[in-house]
Image (tube, grey):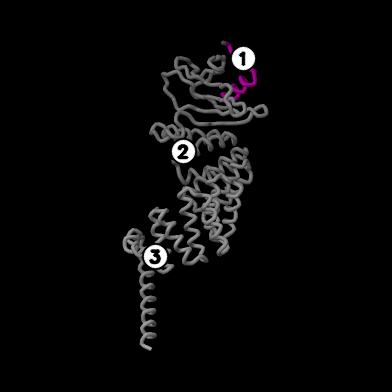
Amino acid sequence: MRTLLLAILLSISSTILCQDISKDIRQLFEQKRYQEIINRYSSQYKTLPYDALFDFGLAYYKLGNDKSTLEIMEECIRQRDNDSGSYYIKGKSLNFLGQYSKATKAFEQAIKVDGGNGSYYTGLGDAYMSMSQLDKALEAYQKATEHTDSPERPYTKIPLILSAMGKPKPALEAYYIAKDKVERGSDIYLSIIYNIGLFELMNSDYFEAKIALEELISLDVSYFRAYPILIQTYMGLRKFDKILPLKEKLYQAHDQGLLKYIMNDRFCIDQFVWNEGTMIKAYERFQSDKNSTYFKHVYEVQENNIPSFSVQTKHVPSSGLPYKLRMTKGDIEYKFAKAFPKKYDYSEIKLAVMDVISDKLSPTE
């Protein structure tokens, strides 16, 4: 009788002790005192009850120690192989360690255990994405969005994959869906509406591009890489009066050294297809020294995305009409009689350039 009573008391004491340990680790974890958890319980982690052991492994995960996280999650799985959480964290750590094939198996096991959720399918998509298996990544991300608890990440990855697959229309549709799923004003949101503006411009849907890009700049006036896209949009809408203020802000940003990594010395002001497949991209250079000779506008004529030749305006400071029309093929520069004033009209320059490209205007030299 005494032996039975002692066994019961020991069992109760052990249960209470386990509960206290689990509660202590959970409190430390919620307070983000991850290293303290490791320091306090690392010598006895194999004796911890499951819930405490899982939180102990999460502490390693939060500290970025993925090798130790894997060791703890394997122990969790040995103790309880019907809990999907351990497989999920195992998969996350394997992703961080670059072991993507093993990660897919861990995520698939997590999904098998409880049917999966948005995060599990997202982790699986990340693994396939890292292995460049775009079809499988797309499928996983799409399944993630079918769950109400889906994180933002799959919504942003789906249009990227569709674009990489050469499916611009579905990609654009996916960007619009993503726009409504992420926090307005966040960095992800800004990137999404930038891409919406870019895709709409590529579709020559200038009005929709304008809506997206104007919203973008209203949210972040320093999102300078959107300025050339909006300039091209205004070109398409023939709203030339709106272009000058954007250019002035770009010039100011350039003078302040804010554009050296995205627009070192020029920015695109126009691009269009001419004569069935010939792409023409027009650039304006930041250089504006009134006493120097330089190319101000450069129209690159591209065949199969490879520059073939270019037509330029050359700034000649001593002339009454300082912007002279030129063409460069290889190392040869051709001169034309056409010239433009200091306060030029872009549409006149474009018309003259097209006359050169279509051989309607012949060089004088």
Residue 224's disc is: 2
Above or below for 249 versus 56: above
Residue nearer the viewer, 54 or 365 = 54
User: Residue at the location (35% across, 61% down)?
Assistant: 42
* Residue located farthest toward the bottom when viewing the structure as drawn: 1
Please say whether residue 288 is one of the residues in the magenta stretch: no
Q: Secondary structure at mark 1?
A: loop
Alpha carbon distance from label 3 to label 1: 85 Å
Residue 362's disc is: 1
Query: Is residue 280 toward the left or the right of residue 7 in the image?
Result: right
Could you tell me the amino acid type at mark 1? Ser
Residue 46's disc is: 3
Alpha carbon distance from label 2 to label 1: 38 Å
Query: Is residue 89 toward the left or the right of residue 134 in the image?
Result: left
Residue 299 is situated, as x and y percent measured from the top left of the image, at 55, 25
Query: Is residue 349 toward the left or the right of residue 92 in the image?
Result: right
Could you tell me the amino acid type at mark 3? Lys
User: Residue at the location (63% across, 30% down)?
Assistant: 273
* Residue located farthest toward the right when viewing the structure as drawn: 276
* Residue located farthest toward the top when viewing the structure as drawn: 365
Magenta stretch bounds: 349-364
* Mark 3 / mark 2, whichever is N-terminal: 3
Above or below for 316 versus 77: above
